[in-house]
Amino acid sequence: MPAYRAVVFDFFGTLTRSVQRGPQHAEIARSLGADPEAVNGVLDRTFRARARGRYGSAEATLRWVIEQAGGRPRSDQLRAGVPARVDALKADTRLRDDAVSVLDAIKRRGLSTALISDCTHELPAFLPSLPVAPLLDATVYSVRLGVCKPDARIYLAACEQLGVLPAECLYVGDGGSHELTGAASVGMTPVRLAAPDLANHLVFDADTNFAGRTVRSLTEVVGLVDRSRIAGTRQRAAA
């Protein structure tokens, strides 16, 4: 087991509990003159394109989604709709009970931390207000980088921000977006978080064939870090 210098986390379903769209999304759709079910259909089938920023700014993207769902929103409605969507996604987001303590424990052990998320414009808007934000040394958002997992560039961007090699990173995720096989392909050590609540998680392109290490809670990740440090100490002593 290598001695890691960094732990890289996915966000939705990893640092957070399972995510489902709450009632605010339907309210936003109706306020913009569109059927909520039609909007959800557009959101589902265009997630990866939206997460790459394909449709432009948050306002331009929202206009495109609503128009695809049959609405014709006014500019003033869209200006109100953008912060409403930020609030809606934040309301859908519940950090895991051990997210803050695990990040803090990792940093106290001298390791760096990073976040890599396939996300739309809303997460970068609200993540700084969450208690995990000060405990992350690097944040990589697909919507800003223009690529999604499992593209190698999104993992390497985190490594560059942290100043580490991929082989020095433990990657923790629930397995959406084929993120675990993507992490492995660049040389990171992937670990699947298989928490019980994820049975109901809204996920796209799940890594269903991943056969690597699995943990049931974030707290178990600290144990992996400790074992890697012990192994590293023994290797140095034997050298």
Image (cartoon, grey):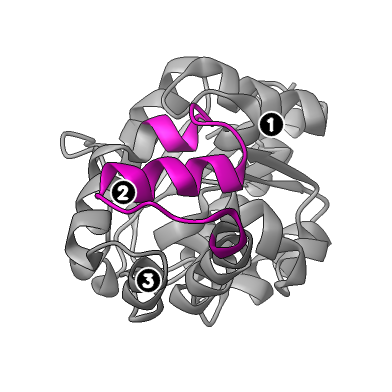
Residue 72 lies within the magenta run: yes
Mark 3 crowdedness (10 Å alpha carbons): few <14, some 14-19, many ≥20: many
Check contact, mark 1 vs mark 2: CB within 8 A. no
The percent coordinates of residue 188 (x first, y second) are 53, 27
Dot 1 surroundings within 10 Å: few (below 14), some, or many (20 or more)? Answer: many
Residue at mark 3 to residue at mark 2: CA–CA distance? 11 Å
Q: Which mark lies nearer to you, 1 or 2?
A: 2
Q: Which residue is drawn at 34% across and 27% down?
A: 181
Tell me if mark 2 has few (under 14), some (14-19) or many (20+) residues whose alpha carbon lies within 10 angstroms of its own: some
Task: Tell me where the magenta segment starts and ends, as one range.
Answer: 49-77
Residue 90 in picture, x, y percent from top left:
55, 72
- The residue sitting at 40% across, 78% down in the picture is 24
Q: N-terminal of the two: label 1 or label 2?
A: 2
Q: Residue 181 carries which label?
A: none
The percent coordinates of residue 107 (x first, y second) are 79, 58
- Count up the numbered dots: 3
Q: What residue type is labelled 1?
A: Ala
Query: Visible in this render: residue 118?
Result: no
170 drawn magenta: no
Residue lying at 61% horizontally and 67% vertically, measured from the top left: 80
Q: Quadrant of residue 164?
A: top right
Q: Identity of the amino acid at label 3? A: His
Give the residue type that dot 2 points to: Leu
Secondary structure beneath dot 3 equals helix
Q: Are marks 3 and 2 in contact (CB under 8 Å)?
A: no
In contact (CB < 8 Å): disc 1 and disc 3? no
Check disc 3 and report the residue beneath it.
25
- Under circle 2, the secondary element is helix
The CA distance from mark 1 to mark 3 is: 31 Å
